[in-house]
Amino acid sequence: MPTSTPNRWLIILCAMAFLLGGLLGVGLTLLVRPAATTSRPAAAAPITSPSAGLVIPASCRQAVDKAQQASSTAEDALQALRRLDTARLQRLLDQLQDAQHELDTLAQQCRDQTGTPTR
């Protein structure tokens, strides 16, 4: 049984790294890709920069906010892992999974509203 504990922690650590990487990847992709100005209707309350002619749909802003929240949650999860607080770590991992689904939805809405093609 002594070998099962390190394996469990390795799996948890790998899962956290995978989730964090996915969240940060989507967040950074949204930040790097320019929002194309198209004739498609933008989401409610878009940010408009008159000098640049840039319109950022609300779903894009929400996706970036969600990615930042997920990053903070991942940092909390790493601290819980360091303290071996498995109950808190499980709750935080569940939150990260929920955030991943929300972020995927928001990212797709952002792509649809900006005309950015899906890979």
Image (spheres, rainbow, N blue to C red):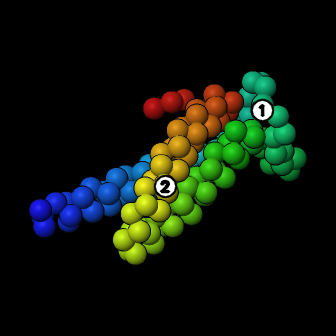
Q: Nearer the viewer, mark 2 or mark 1?
A: 2
Residue 34 vs 44, above or below: the answer is below
Measured Cα–Cα span from mark 2 to mark 1: 32 Å
> In this view of the protein, can residue 41 be seen by the observer?
yes
CB contact under 8 Å: marks 2 and 1: no
Q: Which residue: 67% across, 33% down?
A: 114
Q: Position of residue 80 (x, y in %)?
A: 44, 69
Q: Quadrant of residue 106?
A: top right
User: Residue placed farthest to the right in the image?
Assistant: 50
Q: Position of residue 56 (x, y in %)?
A: 75, 42
Amino acid type of the residue that numbered disc 2 sits on in the rendered structure: Arg
Question: Looking at the image, how many numbered discs can be counted on the residues?
Answer: 2
Image coordinates of residue 36 in percent, x first then y, are 68, 36
- Element type at marker 2? helix
Residue 5, horizontal then vertical, whole percent = 21, 64
Q: Which residue is mark 1?
A: 43
Amino acid at pointer 1:
Ala
Quarter placement of the C terminus: top left
Viewer-side residue, 108 vs 9: 9
User: What residue is shown with label 2?
Assistant: 91
Of 6 and 18, the residue lying toward us = 6
Label 1: state its secondary structure: loop
Q: Residues within 10 Å of mark 1 (few under 14, many from 20)?
A: some
Q: What residue sits 49% from the left and 55% below the top?
A: 91
Q: Is 38 or 96 nearer to us in this picture?
A: 96
Query: Against 70, is 39 above or below?
Result: above
- Callout 2 crowding tier (Cα within 10 Å): few <14, some 14–19, many ≥20: few
Left/right of residue 60 with respect to residue 26 in the rendered view: right
